[in-house]
Image (spheres, rainbow, N blue to C red):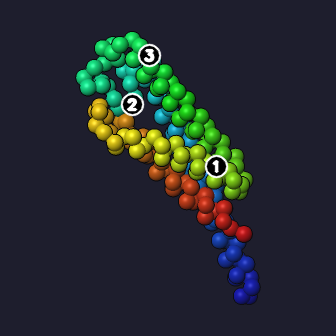
Amino acid sequence: MATQQSIADEQQEQTELGSQLRNGSLLMALAGVAFIGYGLVFLVLNFVGSGFELGVSTLDGMTKADLSPTVAYYISHLHVATAAFIISTGIAVTALSWYGVRQRLTWAWATAVVAAVVGLALALPMHYTADAFSHDWITHLGPIYLATIVFVGGVVMAYRGLNTT
């Protein structure tokens, strides 16, 4: 009888850990989709918005039209490149999470984590180094922080599910 109970307990634990892996990989993938969405908004705003980043309407009171055409084009060039890397990182995180992590591939989990962490670790500190121009902090960084919180929650859940025998 005790053996049957311990087998039932072990099966229940395995089910719970499998559920954590599934839910964690889903959260990681959803965060990747949010990264893609953030990059797309970044891209669209470059062409049909203010010409600046999400949450930035002017640079010290100057609009894109007030800038030298060369400077405005250079800013646009950088925004498109930045959007491309945000979107491509989101695609990588989504695919690795959805297809690799769910298959219990630890390398896919680690690669998704490294891709997101490197991007965020390099991009976010610059926002706190100076007040050279004003940001609407909620619209500028809020979406990426929300996606990061979802991602970290998924990373922790998936890790627990991956580390089962």
Give the spatial CA distance, label 2 vs label 3.
17 Å
Q: Earlier in the sequence, mark 2 or mark 3?
A: 2
Specify the quadrant of the image occupied by residue 55. Answer: top left
Report x, y in % for residue 58.
Answer: 30, 24
SS under mark 1: helix
| Residue linked to disc 2 | 54
Q: Quadrant of the C terminus?
A: bottom right
The structure residue drawn at horizontal position 63% and vertical position 53%, both measured from the top left corner, is 110
Report x, y in % for residue 120.
Answer: 48, 44
Report x, y in % for residue 113.
Answer: 58, 51
- Badge 3 crowding class, 10 Å Cα cut-off, few under 14, some 14 to 19, many 20 or more, is some
SS under mark 3: helix
Specify the quadrant of the image occupied by residue 74. Answer: top left
| Residue linked to disc 3 | 73
Q: Earlier in the sequence, mark 2 or mark 1?
A: 2
Name the residue type under label 2: Leu
**Residue located farthest toward the bottom when viewing the structure as drawn:** 2
Name the residue type under label 1: Thr
Q: Earlier in the sequence, mark 1 or mark 3?
A: 3
Q: Looking at the image, which is closer to me, 47 or 114?
A: 114
Residue 102 visible? The answer is no
Dot 2 and dot 3 residues touching (CB under 8 Å): no
